[in-house]
Image (spheres, grey):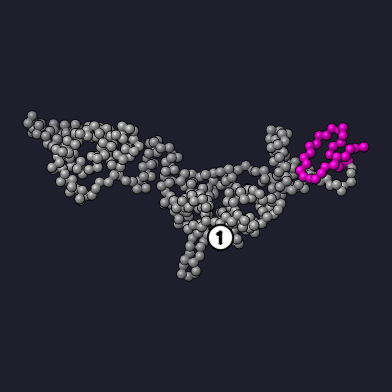
Amino acid sequence: MSLDQTELKIIGKVGSEKEKAWAKRIGPLRKRGNLLLCTLLLGNVMVNSTFTILFDNMTNGLTAVISSTIGIVVFGEIMPQAICSRHGLAVGANTYWLTVFFMILTFPASFPISLILDKILGEEMGQVYNKEKLQELIRMTADRRVLHDNEANIISGALQLTNKSVEDIMTRVEDVYMLESNRILDFDTMTEIIHHGYTRVPVYDGEKTNIVNLLNTKDLALIDPDDKTPLSTVCKFYDHKPLYVDHDVKLDAMLQEFLQGDSHMAIVQKLHNNEDHDPYYETMGVVTLEDVIEEILQREIIDEKDMITDNRQKAPRPRKRQDYEILGADSLRSKLPKQLAFVAFQFLTTTVEPFSDAYLARNVLMNLMKKDIVVNLTPTEPVSSKNYLYNKGEVTDKFVLILQGGSILFLKKS
């Protein structure tokens, strides 16, 4: 009786081959729970009564009571239950025919009683856990080191999806990085987008609560900042319409929506339908597939571009300054365009060995590039010694990098 039907079914599917055979053998008997219970109790009463009568015939009354009590408790209760609580499956399978024998022997008395119990109490169901009990069982299993903590957290997080809504995990609209639809995709805007590091950026019209489109940063791969393309043009061309969801949508439903692949970012809205004014939707924030996965994993996913570790606590993450940040707006006092300065810096540090990190610190090269070291040579200027890059036969210690220009005319000094 200590073997639960649910446990037997689990063992029959995932146990060892011997355990599967034992569970398959015990299953039919255990399924008739009330009949088995009546058989065991009737047999137990018969054994206890027999012990008492035997000891009474062998000794006097008081001794018989003490002896029978000790014998029944020790050999009839304590030892069998101690053994069966640890090896119940093996004991039950090996005493199968003995149990069948007693079921047949007590059938005239046990069967009618079991029928009455079935009618009154109903069919016995196996042990079933609700979500709270199942989560506690998982935590207890993790404490015994049967499961790793990460595995237990993932299982527990998956069980909580139906208990949480998107409002619980969303990033509030005031904390969302957005772009206004009338922005121009120049170098400063592109640098700003790269600096924030988001894959998708909501685009709003007028107010932040009026989100009209989504900008996927990969759409900017072929955009030249010098063309100063309007953001609205890019949005109209790719037309990534935002996905709108109600604030009380459960996370399991949100996950299924994301898995369809239409969008991995959704705009969270709340319907206000009061009698005082017309119904309207309030934009509360955004929720992403990453947010839902973080709830399953029970930990934050921090990629290489994240500036904060948590959308709700807003804990900043220490980050190294990027090259485009240092060479960005107001950092260059030379006549070199910002985009061209960034490209030149990347070329020198990654391609030209004397300017690599092994020979020259990057901050030193940055300081050099901030100086007025750019010279524009135009064909209209008169030929003089200052126009010469090199003189034949003269050693020079200057390094020259031609960034842009047309044809080059070499003049020979007379």
Up/down of 413 relative to 133, above or below: above
Image point 72% across, 48% down: which residue? 338
Q: Which residues are magenta?
A: 385-414
| Count of marks placed on residues | 1
Which residue appears farthest toward the right when viewing the image?
Answer: 414
Q: Quadrant of the C terminus?
A: top right
- Which residue corresponds to mark 1? 209
Q: Left or right: 58 with respect to 103? A: left
Q: Position of residue 263 (x, y in %)?
A: 53, 52
Image point 14% across, 38% down: which residue? 105
* 402 in magenta: yes
- Per the image, label 1 sits on a secondary structure element best described as loop
Q: Position of residue 61 (x, y in %)?
A: 8, 33
Which residue appears farthest toward the top when viewing the image?
Answer: 58
Residue 202 visible in rendering: no
- Name the main secondary structure of what is drawn in magenta: loop
Q: Left or right: 342 with respect to 17? A: right
Q: Position of residue 330 (x, y in %)?
A: 71, 49
Image point 9% across, 34% down: which residue? 53
Image point 69% across, 48% down: which residue? 328
Q: Quadrant of the N terminus?
A: top left
Q: Position of residue 280 (x, y in %)?
A: 50, 65
Q: Amino acid at mark 1?
A: Thr
* 397 in magenta: yes
